[in-house]
Image (cartoon, rainbow, N blue to C red):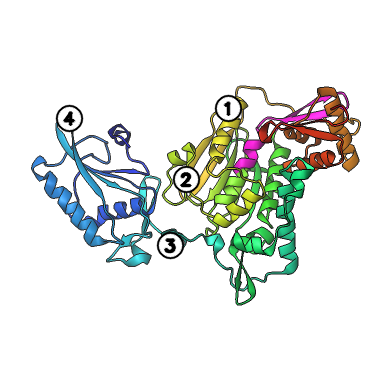
Amino acid sequence: MTFEDILHGESKNIEFKSALSHKSERYIKTIIAFANTSGGKLVIGIDDETGFVVGVDKESVFQIMDSIANAVSDCCTPQIIPDITFQTVDGKSIVIVEIYPGADRPYYLKAMGKENGTYVRIGGTSRLADAVKIKELEMEGTNLSWDELTCVGFPVAVDAVKMLCDNIRSHMLDAVSTEEEARNIPEVTVEQLQSWKVLKKTGGELLASNAFVLLTSDYFRFAKIRCALFKGTDRDVFIDKKEYSGPLYKQIEAAYQFVLRHINHSAEIEGLVRKDRYELPVGAIREMIINAVCHRNYMDNSYVQVAIYDDRLEVTSPGMLYGGLTLEEAISGRSKIRNRTIAEVFSRMELIEEWGTGIRRILKRAEEFGLPKPEFLEIGDTFRVNLYRQADKKPIKKADKKPIKKADKKPIKKDRQELIFAYVRENGSISNKEAREILCLAESTTKRILNRMVQDGTLTVRGERKARVYVSAIEV
């Protein structure tokens, strides 16, 4: 953070004081809040109302610096070590107290105790942390992840374990393209769930982690996604709304389909094939929802919210950026995982790729579509992503539901394969994305169909991963 950044004004990471208060508690709260959040700078000698440099007494600079260091040492616990410097601006001296994100959280005022003296930074203010935030800070300080903790009393049912193992493996199979690769994917076992900390074993008894509960049930009241379509650009008038609960990965798919139903798309008829093209990049839509579910604070009594407006898709998740991560660091690709077990399982299921790349993928997809740059915001104790619709283009009309041979049905397995093969005959190859657009199905289901056609000898694979396409095996 440069001095030019400081002069931009107060923010989540910068606070001004025109002079050092005689009551050290006033500015110590800010220092504690910085240490408990993503760090920041307290600048003494700049008027907090006007932003003008007023300076401090030049003869007292070192005395002020010593006074701050002593107050931080005396008033804060655990110990916070500030970096205190001074600088001359326009002939006036200012003192800069830089605080780094702390590792021994929570930090609090000794005299007030943890419950009444813990502060966090929200927006441009320092606020008293509530019990939920203190609990999360405690876990950060001991390097614990809430989803790894045991959900006391929740039964580990055999059928629930089997369903989770089968679904994880099904997603793993969807990610491969050849029969040989599929044969190399083993069954997912209870032992693997234990190694991923989804289950725990104590005294011969299997215990459920919070992650197991989230991945198999709707036990937690606020572990849901609320979706809504609004008229206009604010939340005044509902047009449609849904609430999805149950296993997290099923919630994600349901919310994704909700968005697709309510955004514009066009249809092109190519031979017997009808191709739907959405106004927003489907990859960015999925990424926004997956990130919200994977990285939210599950101790917060709020829902993930997916809202569609005339000008944007808005996804909001409970919880600020985790572990002292700043917004700039998150956008650059740095990642700190709040829910490590869920992230591990989602990674195995190919729902997420490389950790820390989600925001960059959203930005890239929006750029490819020629859309305005997506917006990433910390609003209070929530994190929000806005994916803007193209404002300078005429709205795309919903595709007319004309009766088209095979494509307008809810095709059975055989019909789906015929549609894919017809596209390959006409265009020479087909990608997973193109197949999804033709069939209007989820990515995982489309992969499964393509892989089955490879196994049946109808198609063969060319290229690897993102460059992978499917061509006719008969003509190869």
The answer to whether any part of residue 231 appears in the image is: no
Location of the C terminus by quadrant is top right
Marks 1 and 3 sit apart, C-alpha to C-alpha, by 40 Å
Tell me what residue is drawn at x 87 percent, y 23 percent: 271
First in residue order: circle 1 vs circle 2: 1
Marker disc for residue 379:
2
Neighbour tally class for label 4: few under 14, some 14-19, many 20 plus, Cα within 10 Å? few
Q: Amino acid at mark 4?
A: Asp
| Magenta-colored span | 264-288
Could you say which quadrant of the image residue 365 lies in? Answer: top right
> Does the residue at mark 3 contact the one at mark 2 (Cβ under 8 Å)?
no
Residue type for callout 3: Thr
The Cα–Cα distance between marks 4 and 2, rounded to whole angstroms, is 35 Å
Tell me the amino acid under the disc marked 1: Glu
Q: Are marks 4 and 3 in contact (CB under 8 Å)?
A: no
Please name which of the two marks, 3 or 2, marks the residue nearer to the observer.
3
Tell me how far mark 4 sits from mark 3, CA to CA: 45 Å
What residue did someone put label 3 on?
142
Q: What is the C-alpha distance between the residues marked 1 and 2? A: 24 Å
> Of callouts 4 and 1, which one flags the residue occurring earlier in the amino acid sequence?
4
Q: Which mark is residue 367?
A: 1
C-alpha span from label 4 to label 1: 42 Å
Q: Position of residue 244 (x, y in %)?
A: 68, 53
Give the residue at x 71% y 59%. 164
Residue 261: in magenta span: no
